[in-house]
Image (cartoon, rainbow, N blue to C red):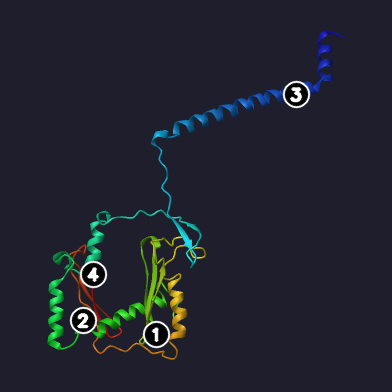
Amino acid sequence: MNHRARRRRRRRRHPLRTVALSAVALATCALAIAAAVLGSWAIGVVDDTPDIATLHPRPQPSVSAVYAADGSRLGFIAGDVLRVPLRGRGVPWQLRDATVAIEDRRFYDHGGIDVLGAARAAVENTVNGRTVQTFSDGQTAKVTDALEGVLDHGTAAGLGIGCPAAGKTGTTSSFTDAWFVGFTPVLSTSVWVGYPSETTSMSAVPGYGEVFGATIPAPIWQQYMEGAIGSACESFAAPSEPFVARPFDGAHQSAPGEETTTTTNSTTVRLVL
């Protein structure tokens, strides 16, 4: 038997050794590739990591404490929304002016105390011998009609009492107060929900989450009014003086408007577009 035949015969006797050597070679290659990938990832992480000197603690939302009627503390409610209180100077001037214009367009003229307006009201009351009605019944009827929509398709939809009623939900910033004020032709009731002796956010109340005027106050109002109204289920009276809207060109509007006329329910409404 020559040398080549002996070599071939020896190779046939040890096939496992060939397989083992192949497996070792493949494993070595795989480990080398994995090490290269891991090293590249680690270098990328190190490069993307900010300098520790530039890191600061993350502000946390406020935590509300829950107390029992006897004053004992029951636990805490962690807030999930971070809100930053602003002082007056921090509120954008556009928002301040728009809010003031809604309440009193002459606010910046009289500085908050409208002596002329108070004197004019006093003269009118004295001359007429009675308190002069500021709004016509047509104006109040239009406002009532809008507030009836709150219980029909607005923020408190589905919380009516089965009789003509109107109302308005309300919520302060940071959810520290929530209320609902509603009325019928014979009864007016308001419901407020909050902490009477402290300013505590109701942003994470168990079972409710963020408390709005429609989440807790309006259902309380509904339950009370359904019993209090009794048989006095009356409709709001029709106004004797029709409501007629007029265009408003205020100092804080974005641009002068074009006047249009729209007729709804036999009432002429003039709008500014």
| Callout 2–callout 3 Cβ contact below 8 Å | no
1 or 2: tag closer to the N-terminus: 2
Circle 2: residue type = Thr
1 or 3: tag closer to the N-terminus: 3
Q: Where does residue 61 sit, x and y in percent of width and height?
A: 43, 53
- Residue beneath disc 4: 103
When the figure is inspected, residue 162 is found, relative to residue 21, above or below; the finding is below
Give neighbour class at mark 2: few <14, some 14-19, many 20+ (Cα, 10 Å): few
4 or 2: tag closer to the N-terminus: 4
Circle 4: residue type = Glu
Circle 3: residue type = Ala
- Residue beneath disc 2: 134
- Residue beneath disc 1: 164
In the rendered image, is residue 273 in sight? Answer: no
| Callout 1–callout 3 Cβ contact below 8 Å | no
| Callout 4–callout 3 Cβ contact below 8 Å | no
On the rendered image, what quadrant is the N terminus found in?
A: top right
4 or 1: tag closer to the N-terminus: 4
Mark 3 secondary-structure assignment: helix
